[in-house]
Image (cartoon, helix red, strand yellow):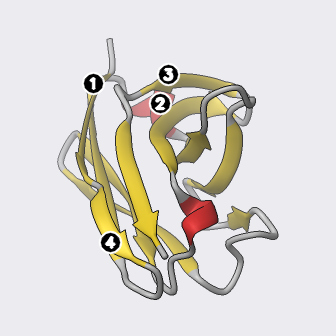
Amino acid sequence: QVQLVESGGGSVQAGGSLRLSCAAAGLTYYMQVMGWFRQVPGKEREEVAIIDSGGITNYADSVNGRFTVSRSRDNDRESVYLQMTSLKPEDTAKYYCAVGPSRGNYLWGQGTQVTVSS
């Protein structure tokens, strides 16, 4: 069983920065793909940034160049981070950590709210 613990998020003015963290403990083989999704009320959850076990990343066009996803490992615990810079009001959403053995097959964190004011 994989357990996910998210931290970070909050409120910031446009142009500011935030950093999200997600610590995953449990089945290491399940942590091949890690990343972040976001969702606003009334819309589908969208992929923001993912990183695989080889360090290959993929970003949504809307955040490319502003957000950076990274991961680290400490014994049996893997962590994934999302450094968000030059934040815009349209980045306001609930952000979810995602971990899984393959892309599209995820366990989800509880979500953390990011609010960007203009």
Q: Please identify the quadrant where the N terminus is shown.
A: top left
- Pick whichever of labels 2 and 4 is earlier in the sequence: 4
Q: Quadrant of residue 116?
A: bottom left
Tag 1's secondary structure? loop
Is the C-beta separation of discs 3 and 4 under 8 Å? no
Identify the disc placed on residue 12.
Answer: 4
* Type of amino acid under label 4: Val
* Type of amino acid under label 1: Gly
* Type of amino acid under label 3: Leu
Residue density around tag 2, few if under 14, some if 14–19, many if 20 or more, within 10 Å? few
Residue density around tag 3, few if under 14, some if 14–19, many if 20 or more, within 10 Å? some
Identify the disc placed on residue 10.
Answer: none
- Pick whichever of labels 3 and 1 is earlier in the sequence: 1
Tag 4's secondary structure? strand
Measured Cα–Cα span from mark 1 to mark 4: 33 Å
Q: x and y percent of residue 58 in the render?
A: 73, 63
Judge depth for marks 1 and 4 and give the one in front. Answer: 4
Measured Cα–Cα span from mark 1 to mark 2: 9 Å
The one nearer the camera, 35 or 102, is 35
Identify the disc placed on residue 107.
Answer: 3
Is the C-beta separation of discs 1 and 2 under 8 Å? no
Judge depth for marks 2 and 4 and give the one in front. Answer: 4
* Type of amino acid under label 2: Tyr
- Pick whichever of labels 3 and 2 is earlier in the sequence: 2
Q: Residue furthest top?
A: 1
Q: Which residue matches tag 1?
A: 26
Tag 3's secondary structure? strand
Judge depth for marks 3 and 2 and give the one in front. Answer: 3
Left/right of residue 92 with respect to residue 17 in the rendered view: right
- Pick whichever of labels 1 and 4 is earlier in the sequence: 4
